[in-house]
Amino acid sequence: MDRTGYCVVSKLVMIKSNFFLKFAVSACGLISLYGGELASADPPPMNIVFILADDLGWSDTTLYGTTEFYQTPHLERLAKRGMVFSRAYSASPLCSPTRASLLTGQNPARIGITAPNCHLPEVKLKASLQATAPAHKKALQCLSATRFDTEYFTMAEALKGAGYATAHFGKWHLGAEPFSPLEHGFDVDLPHTNGPGPSGGFVAPWKYKDFVERTPEEHIEDRMGDEAVAWMEANKDEPFFLNYWQFSVHAPFDAKQSLIEKHRARVNPDDPQRSPTYAAMIESMDDNIGKILDAIDRLGIADRTAIVFFSDNGGNMYNEVDGTTPTSNAPLRGGKATAYEGGTRVPCIVSWPKVTDPGSRSATIVDSTDFYPTFLGLLDLKPQPGQIFDGVDITPALQGKPLERNAIFSFFPHSPGVPDTLPPSVTVTTDEWKLIRLFYEGENGTHAYRLYNLANDIGESHDLSTEQPERVKALDTMIDAFLSDTDAVVPKPNPAYRPGATAGSLSPWNARGCKVVESEGNLVITGEGAAPFISYGTGKSAMSVNLRARSTAGGKGKIEWLPTPTAKKQAKTVEFNLKAGEWTEISHPMPEGGDPGIIRIYVPASSAPVELDWVELKPLKGKSKRWDF
């Protein structure tokens, strides 16, 4: 790869087979030598541009009348070309599962990727179940697969087999090589990264080994937009599939300073959407959508280029930026990582020339699993023998006609602890009704339920499950059939569950390799493994760590500053000693060269409990965070 990465797509395209090698001309039209079939040589095959935003909520654009703060004029331009869907859903409230669903047309329950863990070191191709859970948890949660298996025949492979040039730009988060876009049907992958966000941030300098900025403070979205345009220019004379999965608007939260200042002057302190940094990130996202539209028009291919805009899950409501949450999903309830509407209802535009009416709108339910079978149908391509789709061909909806479907499902067997969090759950959504099953949260080991009429209660504020038990039963039967059909790994009852057991006041810290309870105003940590610790994701600020602890047996512990998955740094640690039976106050600044992504506090690995009175994290600038347990 060219070290700058700039216009490298043009160089890569030159080594690809040319158009005449890809196709043989017959009296019946164009037949791909790879086995896919296109129905006619006239008109030419439709190009596909798929733009996927990251963490962009339903209320984060001007498409639905929910915001006056964010500005998305280029999405409005795209909306005038095609159809806006007001009830589009991601198959999961988190990114990696939805991304896998887009590429396969299958639900995450079937794939096994149910959490965004694909950047972790462990290679795990199948989902599994927790072996144990704390006594206050009623269910054993599921453990997600950590890689997108190459056994799946992806959308990119189907189009490539039909003679399409294929390219992926931006975020992937489904596994590094040998599970990267290059192993899943894409000819080109830039910047060839697998992190959950842009390495080093949105504004250069970035932290990619073979992909560097052209100018100081270059924005990664501007670069991806330029690379995508250069690739389209090089492939404008043949059918292409451009997969532009934007980094925006996922953390880390940074943006062009000029745009931040522009939106800072527009802030209404009474508006829940009031982060100037987030508004600036949305503007850069939208600007590069405009760049793609401009290029398609300039190249004269608008009449044979379909464009889809979608988001991988709902808006982020639990991080902090500019003294507030990144966004608000109102009037929807919840957001990213929740089973409520705010977690899975997302913005969606489809522009397909001669199929969608310009400027049209639809309230039809569509799902991220639908695009793959729809593309095959509209391009007159056949699926592989035995290929399974959980999605449906939504062409009738694109044409403004009724769409026949029973329901959509979202399987989320996790409980991340975010605002509006729920225990491990699965949802079924029909035209009006939505049922949430909470695994084993009812009495005597039964499931619990929440039922909402979305036609009358878009904010999911009135649970009707006790008022309509027959409807709950009917919808729950659909859930049973879905879980059986997908052969999902589902939560099971926790044999260690004890009524009345509590978790203590650890939140928002997480515990690993230890049991945590609250006793007499302190947090009591008892090791259950070789390296028990509690951890906290700090974000971007360099934090010094202060705490007060004691242990009946004493022993050595350590504090670890763990880099974010995309950072090219090593973990930094400092050790501390606890004297037997004595309270000890410990204070350590972050070591030089450390990265502030995650802080772990390891307690002595013994059966003797460690009491934690308080923890304080102090940044170089700004307010400290303190937990008095």
Image (spheres, rainbow, N blue to C red):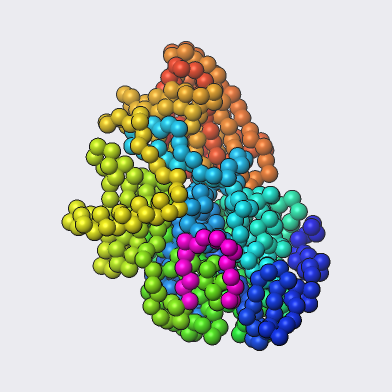
Is residue 231 toward the left or the right of residue 450 in the image? right
Between residue 532 and residue 524, name the one nearer to us: 532
The image quadrant of residue 256 is: bottom right
Residue 152 position in % (x across, y down): 59, 56
Q: Is residue 379 visible?
A: yes
Residue at 30% over, 67% down:
432
Between residue 412 and residue 248, name the one nearer to us: 412
Residue at 45% over, 53% down:
486
Is residue 202 toward the left or the right of residue 616 in the image? right
Q: Is residue 143 above or below residue 375?
A: above
Is residue 424 toward the left or the right of residue 571 in the image? left
Residue that sits furthest to the left in the current view: 467
Q: Point out the stretch of residues depicted in magenta.
A: 379-395
Please identify the dominant SS of the magenta region. Answer: loop
Residue 43 position in % (x across, y down): 64, 86
Quarter holding the C terminus is top left
The image quadrant of residue 17 is: bottom right
Residue 310 position in % (x across, y down): 51, 67
Q: Is residue 403 above or below residue 220?
A: below
Number of numbered discs? 0
Residue 56 position in % (x across, y down): 49, 62
Residue at 53% over, 33% down:
600
Any magenta on residue 382?
yes
Quarter holding the N terminus is bottom right
Residue at 64% over, 83% down:
40
Any magenta on residue 431?
no
Q: Is residue 280 visible?
A: no
Q: Is residue 385 above or below residue 295?
A: above
Is residue 8 toward the left or the right of residue 119 in the image? right
Between residue 119 and residue 146, name the one nearer to us: 146
